[in-house]
Structure formats: structure tokens, C-alpha cells
Image (spheres, rainbow, N blue to C red):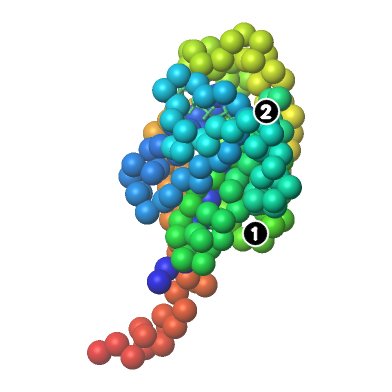
Amino acid sequence: MPKGVLLTISAPSGTGKSTLINMLIREQPEFGFSVSYTTRKPRKGEISGKDYFFVSPEEFTRLIDQDFFAEWARVHGNYYGTPGPKVLDALNAGQSLVFDIDVQGAAQLKMNLKTGLFVFIFPPSLKILEQRLRKRGTDNPETIRTRIKNAEQEILKSSLFDYWIVNHELRTAFNDLKSIIRAERLRSVNFPGLPGRILNRE
Ligand code: ADP
Ligand code: 5GP
């Protein structure tokens, strides 16, 4: 069985990572999405269990105490965490999983998993990032200000990632993402015994 790809994508809020992840899952349905837990309130149209598991701060604290999370972090004033059991199941079954998590969470996951593909997506500029957040229309002006301020810090920590993509033109960014995944799948460790099979072929 080919090894699954554990793909972590981080980017400042509004860069376009949900858009890119949705495109990827539509085109490559073998990728499961790691649904996180959060104390943030649902946005219009968000579904519990699909976008996030929306929980109270008390419930989140209880889950931390039970060591339920593979990583968790406080982001933009709310708590977010990746459920550990789902990650272990994917690892054991060789499934591909995509994580949409912040930079602090990615650092924890990198340390805990010791494997996986870590991709950071940049907006073309902070000005364009602000325009995208405004156009998305899901956050109030104060939330947008917090997210832009945090974007600078996140960009300054981007060096922990294996690959960088600038999401200027969506199609190009998507092709870049697919190329990285393709290269990961072509690693020699994913083809044990291939030379022998080639040499023994009629
Ligand atoms: P994130 O998940 O990183 O917070 P979203 O995927 O929600 O960001 O994208 C933020 C907004 O920017 C959305 O309205 C989306 O349609 C738009 N967007 C994403 N990528 C691009 C792009 N390359 N060019 C223009 N707009 C984009
Ligand atoms: P949003 O509120 O826009 O959905 O997400 C805000 C930020 O939280 C994004 O940077 C997103 O990647 C991050 N995030 C979402 N889920 C998790 C998670 O499980 N863990 C961590 N560390 N960050 C997360």
C-alpha cells in the first residue's frame, strides 16, 4: 500500500488556504480533511463536524487535560486543536490527510509526528491580504485588524516549512501545491523493492 501524505498547510488568515484545500480534496478525494476543534463561534454556513467541531472553552480545556490533541494553540483569541486519534488512524492506515493549522500548531505537529509535508502559503502582500479578508465578508473590521497584525508574525516564522507558495494567481498556486504532493509521492522510500521488480520483469 502506498504511504499516505500528511500535508500541513499554514498561511495567514485570508491568504486562500481553505480555497486551495477545497480544490485539492475535490480533485484528490483520497485526501481526508483533519477537522479541528475550536472555541470560535461558527461563521454563517459553517457546519459542525465538517468545518470544525465547535466546542465551549470548558469542553476544550477538558480535552487538553485528556491529552486528546496532537497539537493545539490559541490563535486570534480562540483555541484550536487537532484531534490526535484521527492522526494516528491515518498514520497506521497509510491514509492521506490535510491539516489547516496555524504556524504554532505546525511547529508542534512537526515535532510530534517527525514526518509529513509542511507547506506555507504567502499572500502576495499584506495589502492584498486585507482586501481578501474584506471581500470574504466573514470578519468584522476589528477581527480583520487582529488577523493582519498576526499575519506579520506568521510570515516571520515561515522558515520552519519545507515548501513556500505565493498565492497570487489561484490556478498557479494550486498547480504548485499539486507538484509538491506529486514529488512527495515519488520519494524512493515509497517504492520498496522496485529495482528488483524492474530487473525481474520479462
Ligand atoms: P483562508 O482559508 O486562508 O483564511 P480563504 O480560502 O477563505 O482564506 O480565502 C480568502 C478570500 O480570498 C476568499 O474570498 C477567496 O475566494 C479569496 N481568494 C483565495 N485565493 C485567491 C486568489 N489567488 N486571488 C484572489 N482571491 C483569492
Ligand atoms: P479560522 O478562524 O479563520 O477558521 O482559522 C484561524 C486560524 O486557525 C487559521 O490560521 C487556521 O489555520 C488555524 N487553525 C485551524 N484549526 C487549527 C488547529 O487545529 N490547530 C491550530 N494550531 N490552528 C488551527
The residue labelled by disc 2 is 78
As helix, strand or loop, the secondary structure at mark 2 comes to strand
Residue 92 falls left or right of residue 84: left
Q: Position of residue 128 (x, y in %)?
A: 56, 17
Q: Nearer the viewer, residue 108 or 65?
A: 65
Q: Position of residue 72 (x, y in %)?
A: 68, 42
What residue appears at the point 41 percent right and 87 percent down from the top-left corner? 196
Q: Quadrant of the C terminus?
A: bottom left
* In the image, farthest residue toward the top: 141
Q: Earlier in the sequence, mark 2 or mark 1?
A: 2
Residue 58 marker: none
Query: Label 1 is placed on what type of residue?
Result: Leu
| In the depicted structure, whether residue 37 falls above or below residue 68 | above
The residue labelled by disc 1 is 113
Q: Nearer the viewer, residue 51 or 200?
A: 51
| In the depicted structure, whether residue 201 falls above or below residue 25 | below
Query: Label 2 is placed on what type of residue?
Result: Asn
| In the depicted structure, whether residue 64 falls above or below residue 39 | below
Label 2 environment density (alpha carbons within 10 Å; few <14, some 14–19, many ≥20): few
Q: Position of residue 169 (x, y in %)?
A: 44, 28
Q: Is residue 116 visible?
A: yes
Label 1 environment density (alpha carbons within 10 Å; few <14, some 14–19, many ≥20): few
Between label 2 and label 1, give the one nearer the viewer.
Answer: 2
Ligand 2 is within 8 Å of the C-beta of the residue at disc 2: yes
What residue appears at the point 59 percent right and 10 percent down from the top-left corner? 140
